[in-house]
Amino acid sequence: MRFRFSEPEERFRREVRSFLADHRDLDGYFRQGQRWPAVKGLFQEMGARGWLSLAWPEEDGGAAGSPALEYLLWDEVAYARAARNPLSAGIVARTLIRHGTAEQKRRYLPPIRSGDLHFALGYSEPEAGSDLASLRCRAERHGEEYVVDGHKCWQSYAQDMDCLWLLCRTGEPGGRSEGLSLLIVDLDAPGVGRRDLPILDGEQLNEIRLDAVRVPVSRRVGPEGGAWKIMGEALADERHIQFPPGRVHRDVEELHAWCRNRRLDADAGVRRELSALAVVALQVEMMALRVLDAMQRGHDATALAAANKVLHTEACQRIARTALEWEGPAALLEDARPALLWRQSMWETVGGGTSEIMRGIVAKRALGLSGRA
Amino acid sequence: MDFELDGEQQAILDSVDVLLSLRAGPERAIALAAKGELDHDLARALREAGFLSLATEVGPLEAALLVERAARAAAVLDVGARALVAPALLREVPDVPVALVHADGRGPVRHAAFAGVLLVADGAVARLVRVEPGSLAPVRSGYGDPLGFVPEALRRSGEALGAGSGERLLRWWRLALALELSGASTAALATTVAYLKQRRQFGRAIGSFQAVQHRLARCAIRTEASRWLALEAAHHGAPGERVAVAAAHAADTAAQVFRETHQLSGAIGFTREHDLHVFSMRLQSLRLELGGSTAHARAITAERWAEGAP
Amino acid sequence: MSLDLAFSSEQLAVGEAVAGFCRERVGGAPPAGDCPADWWQGLAELGVLELASPEAEGGALEATAAFEELGAVAFPGPVVEALIGGQVLRREERAAVARGALRVSVGTHDLAPFVPGCEVQLEVSGQSLFRAPLAAGFESLSSLDAEPVARGVRTREERLERSRAGLDLGRLLLAAYLVGAARRVVALAADHARTRTQFGRPIGDFQAVAHPLADVYIGVASAETLTHAAACEWDERRDEGEGPSPGLAAAAWLAAREAALEACHVAHQVMGAQGMTLEGPLYPLSRRIRQRASHAIGTATARESMVARLDARVGESLG
Ligand SMILES: Cc1cc2nc3c(=O)[nH]c(=O)nc-3n(C[C@H](O)[C@H](O)[C@H](O)COP(=O)(O)OP(=O)(O)OC[C@H]3O[C@@H](n4cnc5c(N)ncnc54)[C@H](O)[C@@H]3O)c2cc1C
């Protein structure tokens, strides 16, 4: 048993850390929407170092690195608050590598690897949230084209992205997870309408309407009607970088530093809660390491990843809530750090699969309980 | 013990509800918040109907009922301060917005930018500070109520309201807070329950899943308790321990209600197009006021176990 | 070598040997009260009582593997204390502890668990262990799970060297024991939820049953890994007996306590009346968890060392 990374891995971590020292004030983890040009610049620099394609196979232009390297990279980036890992180099690239045609790989992988091409995730719809398989957005095939009609919502960052990674129905309506396909749609294609959806954290999501949008069949990734399985695989490839514990450690450390500055840390109640949060942050890290370890062994990490998401996101909220309570009304000022932390963590237990759905997965996979009713 | 409203109370409440249903509500609150405005029209209507003087003309319990109902209707107004707190301290209830200020506070103050009267809690005394309405700087607020800055110098100025007034101000302020928290919690919960009865996923209403039901039920139990604790405290004339208990309970409940209503509403709850935020964001600022639940809890201890207490 | 979260085959073997021994001796329901003499002797023969001591081959990781199994059957007696003794006592005493001939009590200023019946009586205070026997004429009491406790007046004879190493080992072994017990508690409750039928379906179909169990599973799983990390850290620093506590043992202890107590709370709710019977299987475990969670080692020092750890990290990274 070993809770350390190898020397080369640690060397890489140090390299990432010193790279990030120049991006200390980016704050793209929380404010990507407001910092997009700078965040994109960061991705391009990372791309130039080969860091967006660390674990891709060599024949696809990657470095065939281990999951541990990717974990370390995104953990440091999260700790530095620099950015969240981009969808493009994550599930988009991984899916293309597994299932893309030679033409698709040629077209998309190089600009993804260099940090130039970015994607929004087009899964959710007004009526299909937790129950994604009920989605209705429809792609009708006409020869070598699909004609797509539908209504997507909650797309993060779509205002700045180039393409939509669209999940839509090519099969019979009401077919649940059967008959779903993945298409790449240019966000500036005719018929694509986008609307800002401001949210309470001061950032925004997007609503996207597709009105007779023509998409060449060559932009379909994977077999027609076979998207569900592919999505599952891509998700499984990503589990170790989805919720980097560095975020949570940083939250606790900022809270602690802030308590010291305000001289709150002499209070017994404050110290008690701080110690509890420090323990929780370590538990979060342990769970993330378990996910990574399972992936390195080729084990199924579905339940662990769900557990990790619940633990991580609930820890973020607890820390932020504590900060808010200790700061009092001054926390309500827009630029107050505790308020930012709080606003930025309030949706984390909903986005990307809710805590309830995650608990259901844990109950089912780890404990054999259906939790259906 | 009697939990039923008497005929007069019921009549007052009915007409308050009618007025609020016409003049307040989430939609109006959203429009006012976008402009950072206070609801002067509502203030006028309440005054003309005699509701702002309930405390002196009928009694504090009736004024308390008004404050709780106004919070449920998302009134963007200093109802608590004007209809409940000010009458406990001033012979004449001011005809201008009232803001409640803590002399040692650092944060922004609710309604300060519109206030004509500040009631400042400064240790043993309360002080009355008259200001030109609109003279204090507004603070951008995402929390429903318009906020403003009260400079340090103002917090230390004004006319002292006599012995015991500091403590009296805090007691009634706590009570108003407990009522507003309880009203906003009730409304946040009701908004969520209504949404979850109608929102379907997996072929059924989300509200039919047990995890969802049980958590909402827990919120409902605590919200009910908050209301009764606050009304009981009002009935007894806002004694220190009772108001502290009511405020502590209401603040903790608000934290739970905030968490659960947002969690269970999903993504739509984070937009300003859905009504939840009108209540939930207000809960967030109200529950931090006056030091939040920790301070309320300390007040309970001080009231009950302070040296010299019986 | 990169990250590797699996026990080595030697560590697994230690765990399996202990599990086999427990199956054979303890069987289904662990007894209340102190450890029967032959069980204690059996532990000594397995080598459990000397683990992590200077003489032993195995360190904290082996001990962790063993203590998770002891926890799973709520094994009685001062087992954690024996290994603390293996850190702080004199060589001849350590040998006697390892043979099962000498038992160690670790208590607070006036309470000494397992006394009479422990020849060595230690007192814990902050990060220090004192040799502090009770004066004659102490009062004999019994605790929640019928473990004997003595109350009396201590005489502090000496502060023991390697106190910190001993206490950290104690914290992480308590954590391992609690994790083992809590895993079993969750498994029992999940098993019940899968098989118990009400309203025409297994009660685990109901989210109000399934979701709280998922939550405690998550808590216990993360505490388990934290305990393993603490054991690794302890082994790496085995030779530094003093100095500030590095912190993971404290974290593991705090996390495992919380997780185990919460698991009991949920499991009792899920198992209903069946959880209340004295013969078990749930009650003897939850009672022992409560008992160990209230160990004299306490939580105050552990909490302070967590804040100190934060102080150090914040100083390092945020300036
Ligand atoms: C900040 C943010 C960013 C997002 N970004 C994207 C994006 O980029 N692309 C994209 O496609 N989507 C995105 N989403 C959408 C996200 O995936 C959905 O919000 C999520 O899947 C939940 O769906 P919903 O919001 O419709 O909630 P609903 O499914 O309506 O759920 C409401 C509540 O009911 C609970 N619930 C639902 N079903 C059950 C059940 N069976 N048992 C118990 N409880 C249940 C949920 O847990 C939740 O608490 C984002 C969301 C947020 C908040």
Image: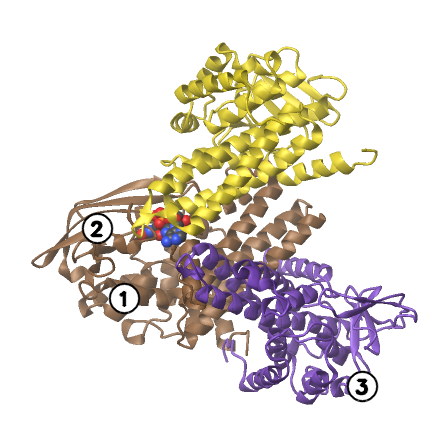
Label 2, label 3: how many angstroms apart (C-alpha)? 75 Å
Q: Is residue C103 visible?
A: yes
Query: Do marks 2 and 3 both belong to one polypeptide chain?
Result: no
Residue B81 vs residue A124: left or right?
right
Say which chain is purple: C
Label 1: state its secondary structure. Answer: helix
Which chain is home to disc 1? A
Residue C230 vs residue B299: left or right?
left
Tell me, yes or no, whether the two marked residues, 1 and 3, touch with CB atoms within 8 Å: no
Q: What's under tag 2, amino acid-wise?
A: Cys
Q: Is residue B155 visible?
A: no
Q: What's under tag 3, amino acid-wise?
A: Arg
- Mark 2 crowd level (few <14, some 14–19, many ≥20, 10 Å Cα): many
Name the mark on residue A137.
2
Which residue is disc 1 drawn over? A229
- Mark 3 crowd level (few <14, some 14–19, many ≥20, 10 Å Cα): some
Point out residue A4 in the picture as x, y percentages from the top left corner: 54, 74
Which residue is disc 3 drawn over? C91
Label 1, label 2: how many angstroms apart (C-alpha)? 18 Å
Point out residue A362 in the picture as x, y percentages from the top left corner: 44, 63
Depth check, front residue: A54 or A358: A358
The tint of chain A in the picture is brown
Depicted B91 relative to depicted A225: above or below: above
Depicted A192 relative to depicted B161: above or below: below
Point out residue C99 in the picture as x, y percentages from the top left corner: 75, 88
The tint of chain B in the picture is yellow
Count of all numbered marks drawn on residues in the image: 3
The part of the image, by quadrant, that contains residue C222 is bottom right
Depicted B167 relative to depicted C248: above or below: above
Which chain is home to disc 3? C
